[in-house]
Image (spheres, grey):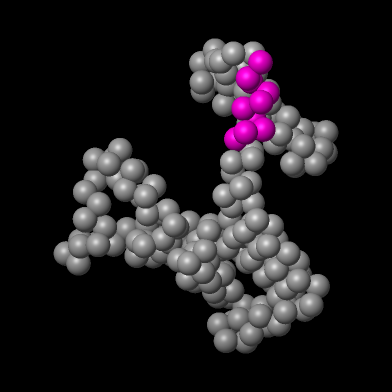
Amino acid sequence: MHPLLILLIGVVTVIGLILVLRLNAFLALIMAAILVSLLAPGAWPAKVARVGEAFGSVAGKIGIVIALAAIIGQCLMESGAADRIVRSLLRVLGESRAAAALLAAGFVLSIPMFFDTVIFLLVPLARSLWRRTRKNYVLYITALAAGAAITHTLVPPTRAKGRLMSTSKALLIDPSDMNSSRKISPTATGTTIFSRAIARC
């Protein structure tokens, strides 16, 4: 079976289990992973085992960090700290620029932290902001994710620098151009474009 078809089946399985059957996201992901593994090439006895091995490898590398970030995010919500931060942002920047504040926060925090960790830390802020304004929830989530993604993928030195170099080679881009003062910074360009998009909303 073609790899793209297997990928499509996996994505449809995840979406269907979560949205249609209302299954827990973790269970949906595990079931989709097993299905994809069964459809992929390889020896039958090893198809289910490799799902467990892959999950254990990922959990061993970043699972503890993400779990701690989730705990901190929940503490921010239940202690009222997230709401206080949101009130401070609104007081300094104004409600109309709240998305830009989340964009900047994601951009800065993603330098020393994993992208996943930044998302877990800042989503409670976006939720608290939405509770106060009752609008633009998708914009707030997109803004913080974009800020974290820009830094994580384009700003050396971050944890994704190795992936940046691999991507630049695949796209036939000289990595040295990323830091050249004679060229336009892709990070600045991406930030500018997204900020303009926010301004139009």
Which residue is located at x 64 percent, y 40 percent?
56
- Is 52 covered by the magenta stretch? yes
Which residue is located at x 70 percent, y 67 percent?
73
Determine if residue 10 is in view: no
Percent of width and height locating residue 57: 59, 41
Residue range corresponding to the magenta coloring: 45-54
Q: How many marks are shown on the rendered structure?
A: 0
Q: Work out whether 156 lies above or below 105.
A: above
Percent of width and height locating residue 131: 76, 70
The residue lying toward the viewer, choosing from 167 and 72, is 72
Quadrant of the rendered structure where residue 45 is?
top right
Using residue 171 as the reference point, say whether residue 19 is left or right of it.
Answer: right
Percent of width and height locating residue 163: 39, 47
Instruction: Point out the image quarter for the N terminus.
Output: top right
Main secondary structure found in the magenta portion: helix
- Is 99 covered by the magenta stretch? no
Which residue is located at x 70 percent, y 68 percent?
72
The residue lying toward the viewer, choosing from 115 and 129, is 115
